[in-house]
Image (cartoon, grey):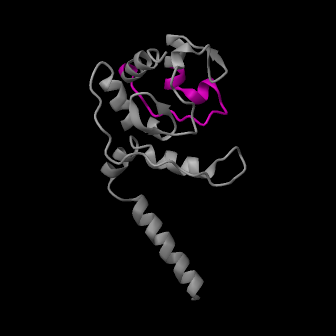
Amino acid sequence: MGAVAILGVAVVGVVIAAWTMEPSRMAGAQTDFQPVRQQMMQRMVAGTGAVAEVPQATPAPVASTGEFAEAHALFRSKGCIACHIAPGIPEAVGTIGPDLNGLASRAMIADVMELTEENLAKWIHDPVGMKPDTVMLNVGLSDPEVETLVTWLLSLK
Protein backbone atom coordinates (compact mmCIF):
# COMPACT_ATOMS: atom_id res chain seq x y z
CA MET A 1 0.00 0.00 0.00
CA GLY A 2 1.44 3.37 -1.01
CA ALA A 3 2.14 6.24 1.35
CA VAL A 4 -0.72 8.30 -0.15
CA ALA A 5 -3.20 5.47 0.43
CA ILE A 6 -2.06 5.04 4.03
CA LEU A 7 -2.37 8.78 4.61
CA GLY A 8 -5.87 8.71 3.07
CA VAL A 9 -6.97 5.89 5.37
CA ALA A 10 -5.58 7.76 8.37
CA VAL A 11 -7.45 10.95 7.44
CA VAL A 12 -10.71 9.04 6.98
CA GLY A 13 -10.19 7.43 10.38
CA VAL A 14 -9.66 10.79 12.06
CA VAL A 15 -12.77 12.24 10.38
CA ILE A 16 -14.90 9.27 11.46
CA ALA A 17 -13.57 9.46 15.01
CA ALA A 18 -14.30 13.18 15.25
CA TRP A 19 -17.75 12.73 13.73
CA THR A 20 -18.74 10.03 16.20
CA MET A 21 -17.50 11.82 19.32
CA GLU A 22 -19.82 12.27 22.25
CA PRO A 23 -23.21 13.77 21.24
CA SER A 24 -23.17 16.27 24.13
CA ARG A 25 -20.42 18.19 22.32
CA MET A 26 -22.59 18.45 19.22
CA ALA A 27 -25.42 20.06 21.21
CA GLY A 28 -23.10 22.87 22.27
CA ALA A 29 -21.94 23.34 18.70
CA GLN A 30 -25.48 24.19 17.62
CA THR A 31 -25.44 27.36 19.69
CA ASP A 32 -21.89 28.51 18.95
CA PHE A 33 -22.05 30.15 15.54
CA GLN A 34 -18.90 32.25 15.93
CA PRO A 35 -16.55 29.76 14.22
CA VAL A 36 -19.02 29.22 11.38
CA ARG A 37 -19.36 32.95 10.84
CA GLN A 38 -15.58 33.37 10.90
CA GLN A 39 -15.16 30.74 8.17
CA MET A 40 -18.02 32.22 6.16
CA MET A 41 -16.52 35.70 6.25
CA GLN A 42 -13.10 34.38 5.26
CA ARG A 43 -14.57 32.76 2.17
CA MET A 44 -16.70 35.56 0.83
CA VAL A 45 -15.79 38.89 -0.61
CA ALA A 46 -18.48 39.91 -3.08
CA GLY A 47 -18.46 36.46 -4.67
CA THR A 48 -14.86 36.76 -5.84
CA GLY A 49 -13.64 33.81 -3.82
CA ALA A 50 -11.01 36.04 -2.26
CA VAL A 51 -10.31 35.74 1.44
CA ALA A 52 -11.59 38.59 3.61
CA GLU A 53 -9.76 39.99 6.58
CA VAL A 54 -11.80 38.89 9.59
CA PRO A 55 -12.14 41.40 12.41
CA GLN A 56 -11.40 39.73 15.71
CA ALA A 57 -13.86 40.24 18.54
CA THR A 58 -12.65 40.97 22.05
CA PRO A 59 -12.15 37.55 23.69
CA ALA A 60 -13.82 38.49 26.98
CA PRO A 61 -16.76 40.83 26.32
CA VAL A 62 -17.51 43.48 28.88
CA ALA A 63 -20.94 42.98 30.43
CA SER A 64 -23.46 45.69 29.57
CA THR A 65 -25.52 47.28 32.25
CA GLY A 66 -28.73 49.17 31.99
CA GLU A 67 -31.96 48.85 30.09
CA PHE A 68 -30.64 46.78 27.18
CA ALA A 69 -28.11 44.55 28.98
CA GLU A 70 -30.04 41.40 28.04
CA ALA A 71 -30.17 42.39 24.36
CA HIS A 72 -26.45 43.20 24.38
CA ALA A 73 -25.68 39.81 25.97
CA LEU A 74 -27.75 38.03 23.31
CA PHE A 75 -26.07 40.03 20.55
CA ARG A 76 -22.70 38.86 21.84
CA SER A 77 -23.57 35.24 22.63
CA LYS A 78 -25.32 34.54 19.33
CA GLY A 79 -22.34 35.81 17.34
CA CYS A 80 -24.00 38.94 15.91
CA ILE A 81 -20.85 40.88 16.81
CA ALA A 82 -18.97 39.01 14.08
CA CYS A 83 -21.02 40.62 11.31
CA HIS A 84 -22.36 43.91 12.69
CA ILE A 85 -21.24 47.14 14.33
CA ALA A 86 -23.62 48.15 17.11
CA PRO A 87 -23.79 51.07 19.54
CA GLY A 88 -22.97 50.19 23.14
CA ILE A 89 -21.14 47.00 22.15
CA PRO A 90 -17.48 47.85 21.53
CA GLU A 91 -16.53 44.34 20.46
CA ALA A 92 -19.17 44.40 17.68
CA VAL A 93 -16.73 45.10 14.86
CA GLY A 94 -18.19 43.11 11.96
CA THR A 95 -18.36 44.57 8.49
CA ILE A 96 -20.23 41.86 6.59
CA GLY A 97 -23.66 42.97 7.87
CA PRO A 98 -24.87 46.54 8.09
CA ASP A 99 -23.82 48.95 10.82
CA LEU A 100 -26.80 49.02 13.19
CA ASN A 101 -26.28 52.61 14.37
CA GLY A 102 -29.49 54.48 13.51
CA LEU A 103 -31.34 51.32 12.45
CA ALA A 104 -34.71 52.57 13.75
CA SER A 105 -34.47 55.61 11.48
CA ARG A 106 -34.28 53.52 8.31
CA ALA A 107 -37.28 52.82 6.10
CA MET A 108 -36.38 49.31 4.94
CA ILE A 109 -34.90 46.04 6.18
CA ALA A 110 -32.35 44.60 3.76
CA ASP A 111 -34.00 46.52 0.91
CA VAL A 112 -36.85 43.98 0.86
CA MET A 113 -39.41 45.01 3.46
CA GLU A 114 -40.62 48.00 5.42
CA LEU A 115 -39.02 48.43 8.83
CA THR A 116 -41.73 47.60 11.34
CA GLU A 117 -41.57 45.71 14.62
CA GLU A 118 -43.30 42.70 13.07
CA ASN A 119 -41.09 42.65 9.97
CA LEU A 120 -37.90 43.02 12.00
CA ALA A 121 -38.95 40.04 14.13
CA LYS A 122 -39.64 38.01 10.97
CA TRP A 123 -36.24 39.02 9.56
CA ILE A 124 -34.36 37.99 12.70
CA HIS A 125 -36.26 34.68 12.91
CA ASP A 126 -35.71 33.70 9.27
CA PRO A 127 -33.50 36.04 7.24
CA VAL A 128 -33.02 33.59 4.36
CA GLY A 129 -36.80 33.10 4.13
CA MET A 130 -37.20 36.86 3.75
CA LYS A 131 -34.29 37.34 1.33
CA PRO A 132 -32.83 34.12 -0.11
CA ASP A 133 -29.49 35.66 -1.14
CA THR A 134 -28.71 37.18 2.27
CA VAL A 135 -25.58 36.11 4.11
CA MET A 136 -27.29 36.53 7.49
CA LEU A 137 -27.72 33.25 9.31
CA ASN A 138 -30.70 31.99 11.25
CA VAL A 139 -29.15 31.52 14.68
CA GLY A 140 -32.15 29.77 16.21
CA LEU A 141 -33.44 32.49 18.52
CA SER A 142 -36.51 31.88 20.63
CA ASP A 143 -39.52 34.23 20.41
CA PRO A 144 -38.58 35.99 23.69
CA GLU A 145 -34.99 36.44 22.48
CA VAL A 146 -36.18 37.93 19.20
CA GLU A 147 -38.53 40.25 21.10
CA THR A 148 -35.64 41.41 23.30
CA LEU A 149 -33.44 42.15 20.29
CA VAL A 150 -36.23 43.87 18.34
CA THR A 151 -37.01 46.17 21.28
CA TRP A 152 -33.36 47.17 21.52
CA LEU A 153 -32.81 47.51 17.76
CA LEU A 154 -35.86 49.76 17.38
CA SER A 155 -34.39 52.04 20.01
CA LEU A 156 -31.35 52.72 17.81
CA LYS A 157 -32.40 56.04 16.27
Q: Residue at x 66, y 20 (%)?
A: 112
Against 139, residue 17 (above or below) is below
Task: Pinpoint residue 3: horizontal percent, then vertical percent.
Answer: 56, 87
The answer to which image quadrant residue 99 occupies is top right
- Number of numbered discs: 0
Q: Residue at x 39, y 28 (%)?
A: 88
Task: Pinpoint residue 32: horizontal percent, then vertical percent.
Answer: 39, 44
Judge from the rendering whether residue 76 lies leftward or rightward of residue 62; answer left or right.
right
Judge from the rendering whether residue 78 lies leftward or rightward of residue 112; answer left or right.
left
Residue 87 visible? The answer is: yes
Does residue 74 show up magenta in the picture?
no
Task: Pinpoint residue 117: horizontal percent, then vertical percent.
Answer: 49, 11
Q: Residue at x 44, y 32 (%)?
A: 140
Residue closest to the eye, 21 or 60: 60
Q: Which residues are magenta?
A: 122-144
Against 100, residue 12 (above or below) is below
Task: Pinpoint residue 148: horizontal percent, then vertical percent.
Answer: 37, 19
The answer to which image quadrant residue 119 occupies is top right
Residue 78 visible? The answer is: no
**Quadrant (top left, top right, bottom left, bottom right) of the N terminus:** bottom right
Against 134, residue 13 (above or below) is below
Does residue 137 show up magenta in the picture?
yes
Residue projecting furthest to the right? 48
The answer to which image quadrant residue 150 occupies is top left
Q: Residue at x 31, y 45 (%)?
A: 60
